[in-house]
Image: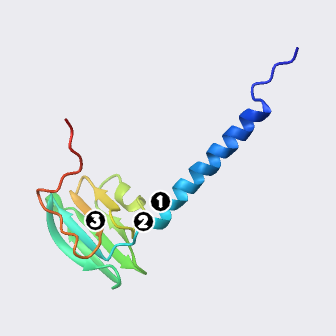
Amino acid sequence: MKKTLLRKNDIYLIGILLIIFLFILGGVKLTQKGGTEVVVSIDGVEAYSFPIDEDLEFEISGYNGGTNILVIQDRYAYLKEASCPDKLCVHMGKINKDGQSIICLPNRVVVEIRSAGKIKSEHDYDTVVG
């Protein structure tokens, strides 16, 4: 007797689950809204805020003399250059959706996309446990 790992019904089930997954993923992507401002924090303190619809190039002076160059272009924000050794923040790519961020740990710089009127305070919680 020849045994097969996947039967016909197993393949149907995998196909249906894959289709459901793609619908859920597509729904999440379609409902995510674009932000309206780019907020720059240095060492945990909000330092700058720029509208996302105005193109600009801005040098950010980070922690301990480190620098990052922020570019806002075509409603996207990204870091063009950084003085940090690993350059991970530069390779994080372009962001434009509410809640997305680019983080440069060595320079302690966070670039975040927010919607207008969404003010983050010290009393905002990410999660509550227990």
Categorize mark 3 by other alpha carbons within 10 Å: few (<14), some (14-19), many (20+): many
Q: Quadrant of residue 10?
A: top right
For mark 3, what is the residue?
Answer: 111
Is residue 67 toward the left or the right of residue 17 in the image?
left
Residue 127 makes an appearance in the image: yes
Under mark 3, the amino acid is Val
Residue appearing at x 32%, y 77% in the figure: 36
What is the x, y in percent for residue 117? 22, 75
Residue appearing at x 28%, y 69% in the figure: 114
Q: Are marks 1 and 2 in contact (CB under 8 Å)?
A: yes
Q: Nearer the viewer, residue 74 or 19?
A: 19
Is residue 103 toward the left or the right of residue 124 in the image?
right
Helix, strand or loop at disc 3? strand
For mark 2, what is the residue?
Answer: 32
For mark 1, what is the residue?
Answer: 28
Q: Quadrant of the N terminus?
A: top right
Residue appearing at x 53%, y 54% in the figure: 24
In the image, farthest residue toward the bottom: 54
Under mark 1, the amino acid is Val
Q: Nearer the viewer, mark 3 or mark 1?
A: 1
Helix, strand or loop at disc 2? loop
Q: Is residue 79 above or below residue 15?
A: below
